[in-house]
Image: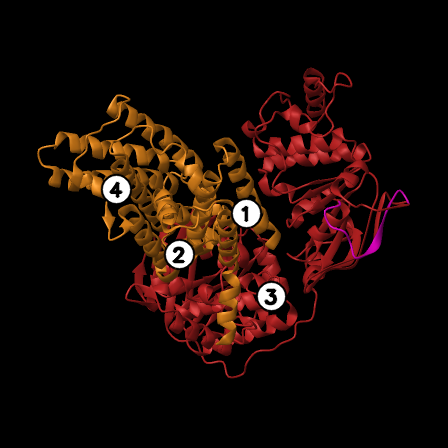
Amino acid sequence: MMKPRLAARLSSVPQFLIGIAVVGECLVFALLSPSFLTLNNFVNVALQIAIYGILAVGMTLVIITGGIDLSIGSIVALAGVLAAGLLEKMSGQPGLGTLLAIVAGIGTGIVSGSFSGLMITRLRVPPFIVTLALMTVCRGLAFIFTGGFSIGNLPLAFGFLGRGHIGPVPVPVVMMILVFLGGHLLLSKSAYGRYIYAIGGNEEASRLSGIHTKRVVQGVYVLNGALAGLAGISLASRLGAGVPNSGLQYELDVIAAVVVGGTSLMGGVGSVGGTFWGTVFIGILNNGLNLANVDPYTQKVALGVVILLAVLLDRIKK
Amino acid sequence: MALLEMIDITKRFPGVLALDKAHVSVEAGECHALVGENGAGKSTLMKVLSGAYQPDSGLIRLDGEQKHISSPIVARNLGITMIHQDLNLLPEMTVAENIFLGHEIVRSRLGWLNKRTMENRAEELLESFGQGLSGRALVKKLSLAQQQMVEIAKAISVKSKIIIMDEPSAILTDRELGELFELIGRLKKQSVAIVYISHRLEEIFKVCDRVTVMRDGKTIQTDVTTRLNQDQIIRWMVGREIEQFFPSDRSIPGEEVLRLESIEQAGKLHNINLSLRRGEIVGLTGLVGAGRTELARVIFGAEPADSGKIYLGGKPVRFRSPRQAIDAGIGLLTEDRKSQGLVLGMMVRENTTMANLSRLVRRGFVDVRSEREVTSGYIRNLLIKTPSTEEKVRNLSGGTQQKVVLSKWLFTQSKVLIFDEPTRGIDVGAKAEIYQLMWKLVAQGIAILMISSELPEVLKMCDRILVMHEGEITGELRREEATQEKIMALAMGLQQAANL
């Protein structure tokens, strides 16, 4: 039984590498800024990456099937404004309103994900095109619904989702950790997760092995949509408002985190663990550069370079 | 002096000697047929000539001068063009754009395209073939026959001296075929040499001057068509001694497990009737494109049949997906392991359990420990050469990969296994192992439908042999009465010749 374990360890090398990169990055920033290595700052970083982390788990599954989802940033906004709109209508019953707002937000994501999934699996439209279209549609709907303004004055109960704490830990961070754990178990331990890899690796062979490929792919887009809805509620709660242009370009940041975490855009390869480290890496990079007083424009250049380096490293390894 | 001489061309692929000192000479103004069974080396030889492959040894002379054809571009510049069966045109471009692709006519050194001249030239060329096509027509709007003419026009426009046509008749109706023959006649008068690859012997007698027969990578004979008949050519094509090797303890096949009645699939399958019994190996042979793989996919639920009935264990079944077929006990070892049979980036373990993973799920999670045990069991029983259950399938040899596919279907407890070209791309030693495994399986009561183009293999393995030709089963031969000649005749749709 030595051999399998050794092989398993070798196959997790990409996560190992990104882990080292995160540690190295921390060392550099710790030297550059005295306030970097503080508990307070780490909680801060965790809070900053929470929304991206939730989204990145769904995106990892989508990308492993060989797909892509560009609509999540817009779903975040649409879910947020619909939840906020509902809360405004039900301002008399904040408790029930909050519950319904959560259902409405996640429901928005599920409906959008179902739509993408159906177009992709039944009508064979490429994921890029379907979700690109959905991206603009959802963004447009968010603006139509609000008339272009934010919907604020949300009840305290709802604010707990974005600004509350459980013990010392912010609620969004708890949500992110749960989503990462759930995603990891689903992908690496369940039969469904195995099918996701198989489809990304070879869809025809999967179909001929009796895997219901359409159902599996459909499910992945629905799940991804649901997570986008959840992220939307969390963001609206944190902002204290449903904002129609929130979540702008989140899809690109999230894809970057997933790719830096070692998931291949060709499908079939990747892991939730890798995505976790990818998200952390980019989160710390942004935070560290901020603390080191690097101006935001230079930060963007640095981020781009890092993404390229990560992917190049992956190439060289192969 | 011959226009083209290919001398002692040898080409080896991993595990296969594809060309073994092949020798062909072609005269200017000649139509030269190249025939042989699937895998005899015709395409490989022509790919060497057209620069797609480099031979390991041997030489090529054009007009007596030795040439090194290092790429398809070199071949084109030497006047050698290959017209592939699946035409190589750009459907979204016009006829003229396609014909002049890569050697466009330009106005000046700046490279502005001279569209009108190209269109006129294209039309003139096609006119000279008797094809009144517009140079501005989009290729995707043309019929297949017209597209083929455009391909030939393209070959002429680069002043080709040798045009290789790979199965040109496969996509043509009878009338269109007549037009093609006329055009070949015209090209011959212009001293263009044609190499004509075809399975249809009657065409060869109509249009070709000489025939070269290939078998097992060797060129067996070249002779003038008028001195030959079909039987002689078939004998050269198959003429090899078959080692008879069959397990003596073969049990008598049991009850019927699978029956097909009048299966139809538009344009692909016609009136297919077939029966398969427990412990029996039935061969399904024929030429490439005869509909064997299509039939396998219908049985497996991967493609729907238009009509007809399938019975499994006496009960009528209708599979709408491979899942249903698998659950009913059917397994399909696809012809192309890499693109359809395996997920190459996944481990042996994951590929083995893929079709029946739910059996290993405990409380929502895959029980990886039992999965390893199951896989190790198959590795021992089937002698799978892999360092561990965790090895990526990509790193294994062809024969070993085939065994992994087989363990996948054993894990689903298949009662009927369809082997589609089970030994393709597998070296000789591994082939023998696959045969042994197949015999072991039928001894355990599994029924096997074996699709194969390799006649010696079919004759060696099968209790009965079904032969397909253009979507129909043209004959059934019992093991005792089957010969390569009879099978070949049936595969070419020549029932009379088979009764010899």
Q: Is residue A127 left or right of residue B227?
A: left
The crowding category of the residue bearing disc 1, from other C-alpha atoms within 10 Å (few below 14, some 14 to 19, many at least 20), is some
Observer-nearest of B171 and A73: A73
Residue B289 position (above or below residue B333)? above
Nearer-N-terminus badge (2/4): 4
Q: Magenta residues? A: B51-64
Where disc 1 sits, the SS reads helix
Residue drawn at (60%, 27%), measured in percent from left and top? B93
Q: Is residue B415 visible?
A: no
Both labels 2 and 4 in a single chain: yes
The image position of residue B428, as x and y in percent, is 65, 70
Label 4 sits on residue: A163
Label 3 sits on residue: B397
Spot the residue most to the left: A92
The crowding category of the residue bearing disc 4, from other C-alpha atoms within 10 Å (few below 14, some 14 to 19, many at least 20), is some
The image position of residue B120, as x and y in percent, is 70, 18
Label 2 sits on residue: A195
Where disc 4 sits, the SS reads helix
Task: State which chain is coloured orange.
Answer: A
The image position of residue B399, as x and y in percent, is 58, 67
Q: Quadrant of the N terminus of chain B?
A: top right
Q: Specify the colour of chain B.
A: red
The type of residue carrying mark 2 is Tyr
The type of residue carrying mark 1 is Ala
Nearer-N-terminus badge (4/1): 4
Compute the Cα span from label 3 to label 2.
24 Å
Where disc 3 sits, the SS reads loop
